[in-house]
Image (cartoon, rainbow, N blue to C red):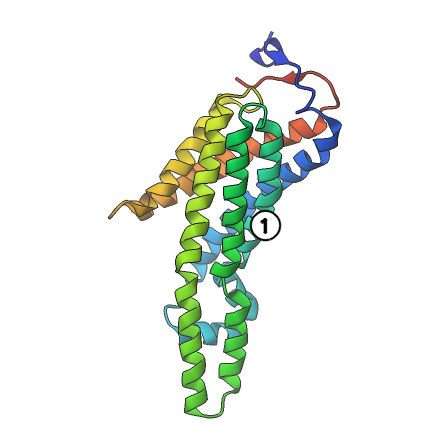
Amino acid sequence: MSQWKQDQVTDPETADSHWHLLYRIAGAAALISVVIVLLEIIRFIAWPPPSTVVGWFALFQNNKLLGLLSLELLIVVGNVLAIPVYLAFYIALRRASVSFMAIATAVGLVGIAAIFAARPIFEMLYLSDQYAAATTETQKAMFLAAGDAMLAIFNGTAAQVNYVLAAIALLTVSVVMLRSSVFSKVTAYVGIITNVLALGFYVPKIGIILALISVLPFLIIWNILIARRFFQLGRLERKELPQQS
């Protein structure tokens, strides 16, 4: 008999049918996030973002969709998709530690809110249109200055808050997984490695390398693992919940 069948526990609250839809939505969101990460990597390699405000304005005028994507519109979408994932984590793991899961959920949601301030996507589109329509050098200089301010926001405090809070929240979730039978220990350890490496972004000289490794392959693997488990939870109907080991 497999370890899966040998280790079974009944967890009525986790398997409660009231949460089945949330689990399925969270599973789908995790898989879509994998697609978004892969698309972002392809987009960055194929179409590197401009380095100047004039370059950004020209990009928007030549291809508005590419301009929006280059300013990480998909990353914003990915953060929105993280909302049901955080909620599903809380429901699934609250019995292991309601306090830590409440903190992780709150921190994660605050991080998601920060991304909207950190990505002035449509503001840049608007400024690009205004710059293209400007008829005097004074007007153009004004819109260029505004564009510079938007790019400063892109790399500013809100962006760092989003990055750090997401890593802290998911690291906390991964640690709580170790105290629960809902997710496998493999899933927990992959989550811990992923988010520790993500925080390594701030290590001098090698930070960017650590951050890239946290995404490829660890973040992708972790999202696939949690998606699989969420779909399993979503199929349960008040019956024994297989314990993950």
Q: Vertically, is 236 above or below 90? A: above
Residue drawn at the location 54% of the way across and 53% of the way down: 113
Q: Quadrant of residue 11?
A: top right
Q: Which residue is mark 1?
A: 80
| Residue 203 rendering spot, x and y as whole percentages | 28, 44
Question: Residue 122 appears in which quarter of the rendering?
Answer: bottom right
The answer to whether residue 8 is above or below residue 92 is: above
Query: How many C-alpha atoms fall within 10 Å of the one at disc 1: few (<14), some, or many (≥20)?
Result: some
Residue 201 picture location, percent across and down: 34, 46
Q: Looking at the image, which residue sits at the far bottom?
A: 136
Residue appearing at x 59%, y 44% in the figure: 83
Work out whether residue 29 can be spotted: yes
Residue 132 placement (x, y as % from top left): 50, 83
Left-right relation of 241 to 75? right
Label 1: which secondary element = helix
Provide residue 44's location: percent of width, then percent of height: 44, 57
- Name the amino acid type tagged 1: Val
Foreground pick, 7 / 99: 99
